[in-house]
Image: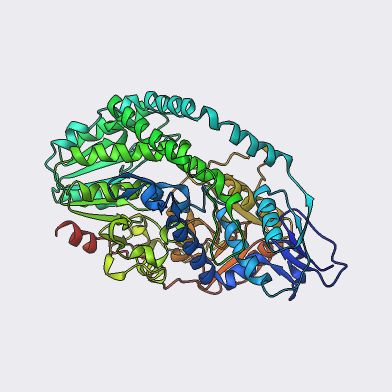
Amino acid sequence: MVALKVIDDGFSAERSDDESLVVFWCRNSQDQNLSERVICLPNLIEDKADTLRARFLSLIYSIGNREVAGIKLTKYLEIRDKFSFWWMTRLFEKCNWDASQHLFDVIKLMALEEWARDAHYDQIIVYSHNINLIETLKIWAKKEKKSFKLISKSKNAQIKKIKNSLLSPFILVYGTLWLAHYYLRRASLKGVGVSDVASSGALITFISYLFNWPDQGQDKFGSQFWGSLPKLLSKEKIKTNWIHLYVKDKKIPTAKKAAKIINDENMQSGGLANHAALDSFFSIKLFVRILRDWIGLIKKYRRLKKFRFYDEHSSIDFTPFFEVEWRDSIIGRSSLTNLMSFNLLEELVTKLPNQKIGIYLQENCPWELALNYLWRRAGHGKLIGAPHSTILFWDLRYFHDPRLLKIEGRQEIPMPDCIAVNGLAAQQMLIKGGYPQERMVMVEALRYLYLNDQGGRRLGVANDVMKILVLCDYTMSRTVNQLSLLFKALNRLKFSVEIIIKPHPNCPVDMGNSMPKNCQIKNDPVSELLKKCNIAYTTDATSASVEAYLFGIPVISAINPSGFNLSPLRGYSNVVFISDEVELSQAILSKNNIINSEKHIAEVNYFNLESDLPRWRSILNK
């Protein structure tokens, strides 16, 4: 009997039978022995990345067009005239880098099916603790009339799934209490800045995030998403409104603190910049409206409980990977969160005087779809989405099936009038993804203008000791993997190395007594730390790797353990991608041999970096 062996991370399998097909789900030390019958899925995915991404986007598109009770799902889930709540679900969002990392597994399954289509095998053997993967492959084996064998199974995952289903009878009580708790926690923001915004006379509104507030004495807005743009607006006496989405963090731990910041800004701006939080528009009336919308979705969910998620061109049923987030998207906490955002934005756009321009930070989160719909319905002017950082090939939030980017009558997806792209890299990525170039406008990369300072660049530190700057990730799992590989690699080196660890603001690093003597943690700006190092060591998902690259520093990036290369430098030369400590130690050694003997200069037009902001000026003065 010929077996198809699917081997997940942490497992190994005997390969005594040469006829077996062996598929490594993640990158694995046994990848060295790959052959026509032994493959590593991450390698296969990189080879067929464009095709697989397009197939996944097609799957999401086809789900939205499936029929429920005789009508399309998008129509069935309408919560306002011509607005479908489908667009605010986690499935449509496709946040594979954070909330929905299991989407990587779905794409792997697509790659597996394509590879195995012409292969001959009689049995599927699964080595995994991943309950969703196990269930999906078991269903697939049954459809393909293959026998199925499981080597290991996680009881914890099964228990978690059972607990999830037990919550269903209490969903209404749970949701009401959660919403009430949210309202009480944000009560300090109620009404803060609303009158300032409503009576400002401003014709331009910015919608941004309020978190990671600068330390005392720093320029407050210039140090985060918007660079020197607020200074330009103030200098030219342009009145603006700023609507902040408050995100709790160490610097702004409470809504009361956020309210104080907003009130202080309004007092200091002299009426030029007028601030409010989105939560400022919360009220008891709004609370009731959110509950009404949510109860409507609960009623609709009765027909969606047994909804299946499959591609008509595939024999794989992906339902095990989607069913939990599907329930959460329609009747769970995600549903409540998104309905709250929708209703708050609905209140905002009705209280704003007619606006000429709206500009928001674009990451294609659910609230942005609501903003686009509500802004246009309220009759305001041009709405511009502004991605504040890099756009990654595998960040699925930024991409859709091409059919969705065309007008489809009543079900056109809400989109901004144009996207403000901050450089050639972002523009080319979106064009290749099918986004129409005529709906893009070039702007300066506000967060990265310091890179334009040629005097600030360094091509390595003239020092006998190598200094590695570790730019950590925004997720703890990736940061732990990154540091673990580094400390293992250092044991292989035969020369001195000093390590500077720069944690991400959203993911502090505290190693306590386990901190090696040659390591120190620093929270200085990346621009300052880059001047002190020879090598930048990053995770693949952080945009800080681009800063190091454009600064002229050799970059080594640790690939996500899942195997997908999430780097904004994917496809660029002079960047080394590693997946284990052996590859990392070899990369450090090779970089050590060229430091101070060969210049590493990145002549790449990645960002637009004109410090006088001619492109932003043009947009704001139209």
Residue 264, horizontal then vertical, whole percent: 25, 31
Residue 64, horizontal then vertical, whole percent: 43, 55
Q: Residue furthest right?
A: 16
Q: Residue at x 47, y 43 (%)?
A: 329
Residue 458, horizontal then vertical, whole percent: 46, 63
Q: Nearer the viewer, residue 440 or 260?
A: 440
Q: Residue furthest front?
A: 70
Q: Is residue 311 above or below residue 68?
A: below
Q: Residue at x 35, y 36 (%)?
A: 293
Q: Is residue 347 above or below residue 453?
A: above
Question: In the shown orientation, is residue 301 left or right of residue 414?
Answer: right
Q: Quadrant of the C terminus?
A: bottom left
- Whether residue 162 is visible here, answered yes or no, is yes
Q: Nearer the viewer, residue 220 or 162?
A: 162
Count of residue discs: 0
Q: Nearer the viewer, residue 537 or 506?
A: 506
Q: Quadrant of the N terminus?
A: bottom right
- Whether residue 531 is visible here, answered yes or no, is no
Q: Residue at x 43, y 49 (%)?
A: 69
Q: Is residue 261 above or below residue 137?
A: above
Question: In the shown orientation, is residue 94 left or right of residue 338?
Answer: right
Question: In the shown orientation, is residue 241 left or right of residue 437?
Answer: left
Give the colour scheme of this rendering: rainbow
